[in-house]
Amino acid sequence: MVRTLITSKGQTTIPLIFRKKWTSREVLWEDCSDGSLRVRAAPDPMTLFGSAASTIPKDPKEKTKARTSWGL
């Protein structure tokens, strides 16, 4: 556990040990029902890029089929 101070402007510093561990530049603050707060790194949407990629070969005429079915 690390203790930091809150400035008169309501700001605090995230300790270096946590900033190095997190790859995100944003944090989420969660107000828990027991009165505590949870601070965690915000997920980076770009880390999901390609995560749903399929190994099944694509039909080369897939775009044409889709556009035809949409009436484009």
Image: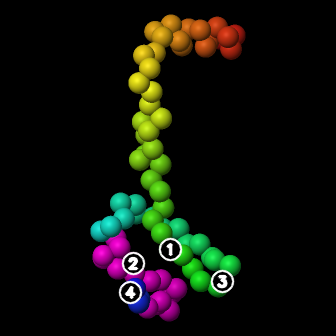
Which residue lies under the disc numbered 1?
Answer: 39
Q: Is residue 71 left or right of residue 56?
A: right
Element at label 3: loop
Sequence-earlier tag: 1 or 4: 4
Element at label 2: loop
Most frequent secondary structure within the magenta stretch: loop
How many residues crowd around disc 2 within 10 Å: few (fewer than 14), some, or many (20 or more)? few
Of badges 4 and 2, the one in the foreground is: 4
Which residue lies under the disc numbered 4?
Answer: 2
Kind of residue indicated by mark 2: Ile
Kind of residue indicated by mark 1: Val
- Locate residue 24: give its quadrant: bottom left
Kind of residue indicated by mark 3: Asp
Residues at marks 2 and 1 touching, judged by CB atoms closer than 8 Å: yes
Please give the range of residues in magenta: 5-19
Kind of residue indicated by mark 4: Val
Residue plotted at (48% across, 11% down)? 59
Which residue lies under the disc numbered 3?
Answer: 34
Sequence-earlier tag: 2 or 1: 2
Report the disc number at residue 14. Answer: 2
- Locate residue 14: give its quadrant: bottom left
Quote the CA–CA distance across marks 2 and 1. Answer: 10 Å
Sequence-earlier tag: 3 or 1: 3
Residues at marks 1 and 4 touching, judged by CB atoms closer than 8 Å: no
